[in-house]
Image (cartoon, helix red, strand yellow):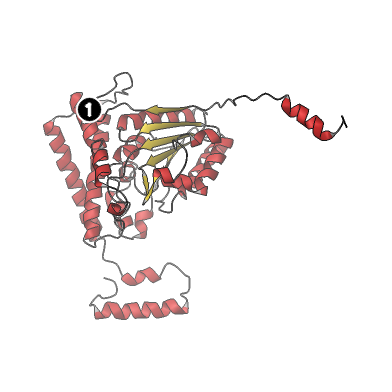
Amino acid sequence: MTNHPAHGRKERLDGVPRKPIKIKPTLEYLSILDGAGKVDDALDPKLDTDRSIYLYRLMLLARRLDERCINMQRQGRIGTYGPCRGQEATHCASTIVMDKEGDWVVHAFREPGSFYHRGWPLERIIQFWGGYEEGCTPPDGCRDLPIAVPIASQIPHAMGLAWGMKLRDDKHAVLCYCGEGGTSEGDFHEAMNFAGAYHLPLVTLIQNNQWAISIPREAQTASETIAQKALAYGFDGIQVDGNDPLAVYVATREAVDKAKSGGGPTLIEAVTYRLSMHTTADDPTKYRSDEEVKKWEKLDPIPRYRNYLVGRGILDDKLIEEIEADVLAEVAAAVDRYEAGRDVDPLDCFDYLYAELPAELVEQRAEFELCLQREGVAAGH
C-alpha cells in the first residue's frame, strides 16, 4: 500500500511550497497637469513653443469640427456622427508623437484631430459621416488604415502591421486607438496575445471614456484597470490621465521609443470621458446623470491645457482669439468644400455591392427611381 500512486502524488504535492509568481511587466499611473492646469515641473516635457501651440490648435480644431458636424447631422446634411468632445487630448497628444514617414496609425472613428494631423483633409472626414466612400480613404502616401467603426476590428490589423515591421526589421512603430468597450471583444485579446508573444512594436491606446454606448466601464470588466490587462500578455501597461495632454504625450513617446528600440508592445489606458453622446443616434440622458457629466466637464482637456500654456507665457488673450478665428475659418472652408461635392446620383448606392444586381434589388432600384422622380430629384443630382 505504501507504493500506491495516489500516496506518492500526495507526498509530492505536500512538499511544494506556496509562493507568489514574479511578473516582469510594470504598471503605473501618470498625470502631469492638475484639473486647473497647474503642472508638475519635474514631469513637464516642456514642448517647444511651436509644438505647444500646434497641439493646442489641433485640440481646438477637433472640438470645433466636432461641434459643426453635430449641427450638420441635426440639419440632415450628414448621417450619424460620433463626437469626440472631451477626448481631444487622448488622440491629439498621442498622434503628434508618431513619425508620418515611417510609423503607422490605426484609428477607430473618434479621432478627428489625429486624422487631420496625419494629412486627411477636413472635408474628407465630413465625407465619411456623410456616407461617401471617399471619406474612408486615407490620403496617398499616408500610413494610416481606413476608419474602423466595427468595435475592435482594427486591432488585429494594427498587430499585423507591427508583425510585418518586425519581420522586415523595420525600426518603426504602430499606434492603434480603441475604446474601453473594445477590450471586451475577442479581437482585442487575440491581438494583444499575439503582440506579446512575438514582442511586436505595437502601442495600443485605449480611450477609456467610461461608457461603451450605455454600458458603464465597471460592467465591462472586473479588472481594477484596463491597463493591467497588459500584464496577462507579458508586456507593460500604463494608466494615464486622458484629459491631460502632457501625460498622454509623455506616455506615448516612451512607449513608442521602447517599441522602436525592440522593447515590445505597450498598452496605454487613457482615462477620459465622453462629454457628448456615443453617436447622434444615442440619447445619453437615458443612462447617465447630468451630475456625472458636470463633474467631468471641470476636467475638460482644452481649458486645462490653455491655462497651462498661459502660465508658461506661450498663449495670451490675443493669440487665443487669433487661433480661434483661424480654426473656425478652416472648418467653415472644409464644410463649403464638402457641400460643393454633394452633387451625386442617389441611385449610385445600388452600383457598388454586386457585379450583377439580384432581382429584388433591381425592383428596389426601379421603385427608388420612381420615388425620386415624384419628389423632383433627377438622377445625377
Residue 246 vs residue 362, the one in the foreground = 246
**Residue at point 29%, 40% (across, down):** 88
| Mark 1 neighbour class, 10 Å CA radius: few under 14, some 14 to 19, many 20 or more | some
Task: Write down the residue under mark 1.
Answer: 308
Which quadrant is home to the N terminus?
Answer: top right
Element under disc 1? helix
Residue 281 percent location from the top left of the image: 31, 58
Residue 304 percent location from the top left of the image: 23, 32
Q: Residue 217, located in which quarter of the rendered image?
A: top left
Question: How many numbered badges does the structure rendering display?
Answer: 1
Q: Please give left or right for residue 232 compared with residue 38 in the image.
A: right
Residue 372 percent location from the top left of the image: 28, 77
Q: Please give left or right for residue 232 compared with residue 178 in the image.
A: right
Residue 159 percent location from the top left of the image: 51, 42
Residue 179 vs residue 222, the one in the foreground = 222
Q: Is residue 212 above or below residue 370?
A: above
Any part of residue 5 in sight: yes
Q: Is residue 378 above or below residue 320?
A: below
Which quadrant is home to the C terminus?
Answer: bottom left
**Residue at point 17%, 46% (across, down):** 329
Residue 290 vs residue 96, the one in the foreground = 290
Any part of residue 169 in sight: no
**Residue at point 37%, 59% (across, down):** 133
Residue type at mark 1: give it: Tyr
**Residue at point 49%, 32% (across, down):** 171
